Amino acid sequence: MSQVQGSLVRAYLYKALWTLTVTTTSGDDFYLRIGSETSTAIKDTDDGSAVAAILQAMTQFTATDITSDGSAGDITIYFIGDYAFSGITVEVADADATVTATVARTFQTTLVTKSEGNGYYKLGAETSMDKNMEIENQDVTNKDSDSWRETKSQIRQVGLSTQNFFLSTENYDKLVGQWKLSLPVVICDTEPNVTGTEQIQNFGVYNINNITQGATFNQNVEFTADFQLTGSPTRVTTGV
């Protein structure tokens, strides 16, 4: 096992978006499990507003925490309020045999800029943000290796930390809300923009290990925090 440590150029909190696609041959039901809670029955004919009402009736949410839009079978779920950057899990539960429903986290492939657009919220300074990776070499030698030992590197875990993260006061309060709820967040870090038109974005769901508030200035809060990746990162190339 080895450890690689480097300085990030930029990192962003990413607003949590999920898409819901439904295929069915009859008017059957399915359910969504969000975190550890399961919704009441959802019809395959329900549109975004109907699904929003069902999700808002779950005990963990209010109308200011979650909403959705779209037509039946093609719905986008938005986490808002304290859940704006949520890495909470969403999955289909107990679908009828004639219903195929899938949910997927949606990442935008636009170029990330300094502006808080397209669901990105700037996190931290432009430089000096440490990204620690533990890399493990797995032995993948098999009968086709022609007597050579073959290994494959995989990322075991990733951590982000710095002394000078900052967010707007509003978004800092949302982040603290997620920390208090023991919810992970979605973070996108970007690698150096080499060509001016391409950008490598690494999306990951991170647990918040700790947050310590520092100075407040110009409606921004400076703070110290440590984030630990859960699962594997998703790598997206933009501008190609």
Image: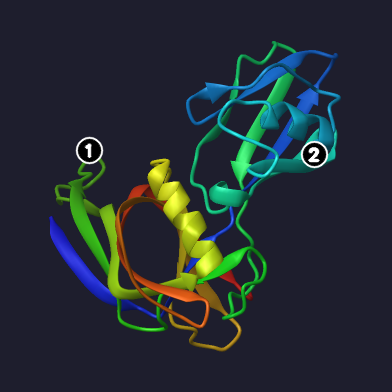
Position of 91 relative to 94 (above/below): below
Q: Earlier in the sequence, mark 2 or mark 1?
A: 2
Alpha carbons under labels 2 and 1: distance apart: 46 Å
Q: Residue at x 14, y 47 (%)?
A: 147
Compared across the picture, whether 11 is left or right of 226 comes to right
Whole-percent x and y of residue 117? 66, 71
Q: Residue at x 84, y 17 (%)?
A: 25
> Is 179 in front, or is 97?
179
Whole-percent x and y of residue 127? 36, 84
Tags 2 and 1 touching, CB below 8 Å: no
Point out the image quarter for the N terminus: bottom left
Compared across the picture, whether 51 is left or right of 195 comes to right
Q: Residue at x 70, y 39 (%)?
A: 63
Position of 190 relative to 72 (above/below): below
The residue where tag 1 is placed is 143
Whole-percent x and y of residue 46? 84, 27
Q: Residue at x 67, y 44 (%)?
A: 64
Q: Would you identify the image quadrant in which residue 5 lies?
A: bottom left
Element carrying mark 2: strand
Q: Which mark is residue 156?
A: none
| Residue 76 makes an appearance in the image | no
The residue where tag 2 is placed is 74
> Is 193 in front, or is 71?
71
The residue under label 2 is which amino acid type? Answer: Asp
Element carrying mark 1: loop
The residue under label 1 is which amino acid type? Answer: Lys
Q: Would you identify the image quadrant in which residue 181 lies?
A: top left
| Residue 173 makes an appearance in the image | yes
Position of 98 relative to 185 (above/below): above
Q: Residues within 10 Å of mark 2 (few under 14, many from 20)?
A: some
> Is 214 in front, or is 75?
214
